[in-house]
Image: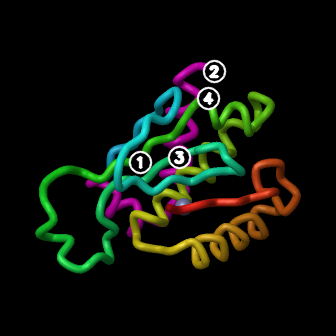
Amino acid sequence: MEPDVYNQAIDEALSMLPPHIRKEMKDVIIVVEDRPSQRPGAVPITRGQILLGLYEGVPLTAWGREYSGKLPDKITLFRESIERIAGRPEHVPHLVRETLWHEIAHYFGFGHDKIHEMEERWRRHRGEAGSPAGSDRKDKHP
Ligand SMILES: [Zn+2]
């Protein structure tokens, strides 16, 4: 799959966020990697055993975040996993968006209960209750 597909899906996902959320995203870098490498302290999102994306950093809501150093937060999307789960190329942008939003929610300090609630709402809102990317969601955190 062309890198452009990812860039476009990422741009789209970001442009669909409310402006006040988007404004807070300036300290986050978003990268696409072929596959995960083990990193300590990273928050994964998995579907079954498959790692789709990763958020690394200190959530906005964390105490003392302002003093937590200068490294920008980082969200990584894993191309091979996303393509495997998506199954078909036309499902990739959708899964990129969902994964990215999930990781952004971590950045804002949300836990999984809250994130799943929001994800349900997004899906209902977009009429995607039966979407291939939305079923069998099993995220795991260490
Ligand atoms: Zn997660």
Q: Earlier in the sequence, mark 3 or mark 1?
A: 3
Look at the numbered disc 4 and give the secondary structure of its residue. helix
Q: Mark 3 near mark 1, Cβ–Cβ under 8 Å?
A: yes
Question: With 116 as the anchor, is 109 left or right in this view?
Answer: left
Q: Which mark is residue 53?
A: 3
Q: Is disc 1 in contact with disc 2, using a CB cutoff of under 8 Å? A: no
Is residue 123 a member of the stretch shown in magenta? no
Q: Which residues are magenta?
A: 1-27
- What is the chief secondary structure element of the magenta stretch? helix
Label 1 SS: strand
Going from the N terminus, do you reach mark 2 or mark 3 first?
Answer: 2
Sequence-wise, which precedes: disc 4 or disc 1?
1
Give the labeled residue for mark 1.
75
Are the residues tagged 4 and 1 within 8 Å (C-beta)? no
Where residue 125 appears, as percent x and y from the top left, is: 75, 69
Disc 2 designates what residue? Answer: 1
Q: Is mark 3 within 8 Å of ligand 1?
A: no
- In magenta segment, residue 24: yes
Amino acid type shown at disc 1: Ile
Amino acid, disc 3: Gly
Q: Which residue is mark 4?
A: 80
Position in image of residue 81 (x %, y %): 64, 35
Q: Amino acid at mark 2?
A: Met
